[in-house]
Amino acid sequence: MSRYSRQELFAPIGPEGQARIRKSRVLLVGCGALGTHLAEFCVRAGVGELVIVDRDIVEESNLQRQSLFTEQDVQQALPKAEAARLHLEGVNSEVDIRAEVGDFNHRNAERLADGVDLILDASDNFETRFLINDVAAKTSTPWVYSGCVSSRAVCMPVLPGRTACLTCLLEDQPSAGGETCDTTGIIMPAVLQAVAWAGVVSLKILSGNTDALFCKMLTIDLWTGEHTGMDASTPRKDCPTCRGEYPWLAGERATKHTALCGRNSVQITPEGEFDYAAARTRISSSAKLGTENDFLLRADFEGLSITLYKTGRALIHGTNDTGRAKALYSKLVG
């Protein structure tokens, strides 16, 4: 029997639905706990092409809940998108897998979303989610909002023009100071619940079964058993996104220097052209170099550490003070 025979035997999908899945292109934004499981789901389900976008490297604390990654990935400081690609190519060689190491931002969102049939949200912040919402609305691309923290999971399908979008329900990103996996923790069952919901929603969309979607924002706490469902079946009449306003995609809401909540780190994204070779020379003359690979270098300086990517984007570890992080970046990188 064929690789996908058991999936085809499921009557709502069948051979016709599987054929649609095989022709599909999926964009996955984020490759952490949710993202690694969703990436593996897509590859094993047999999508035609999977694009994985992630800005981080594999760290030891990821291994508790993020499938695909190994201790060797940690030792090599591999970017998550690239590590996932390498492991997934051995799962299904029929799927075209592309790794995009970097931010999903207003500069590249339309390029990355061009021609895809589905966008999967596996990010860890609402700035990215509202950007996904904007680009999905502008390009009329279905997307799946999903998340998990502590013992809770949430999921919602968005079909632009047909169902409510994220702005319809939340209007704007929540204020800072909310729970994150780094401050509150997370248990694997919450991850798997979110993956299960997002996975089944994806199968319905990709196989042509959108009429079977549950058009709600579903939330469940697996520890307490509490669950809620917010109606998302129709767009809100006064929703600015549904009316064609895309401030996140236009870059009006973008942040250049971001303190990563719960991470004691600051991300810095430079403007314009970047000379990585010159930056490396400058860093090596002042700081203690650590891991280097084809994507980045790591170095320690003045009690902080820097992870510098070849695009110029950097993570300054050991502080949440954006001013201190920017000063270190300027001193080491220029």
Image: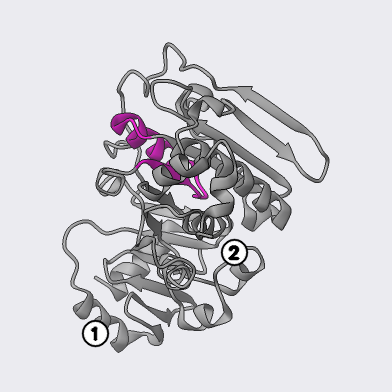
**Mark 1 or mark 2, which is nearer the start of the sequence?**
2
Front one among 306 and 169: 169
Amino acid carrying label 1: it is Thr
Q: Which residue is mark 2?
A: 66
Q: Is residue 121 magenta?
A: yes
Q: Which quarter shows the N terminus?
A: bottom right
Dot label at residue 127: none
Front one among 148 and 94: 94
Q: Is residue 128 visible?
A: no
Residue located farthest toward the front when viewing the structure as drawn: 1
Labels 2 and 1 touching (C-beta < 8 A): no
Dot label at residue 281: 1
Q: Relative to 184, does residue 299 appear above or below in the rendering?
A: below
- Mark 2 residue element: loop
Q: Relative to 209, does residue 301 appear above or below in the rendering?
A: below
Q: Is residue 236 visible?
A: yes
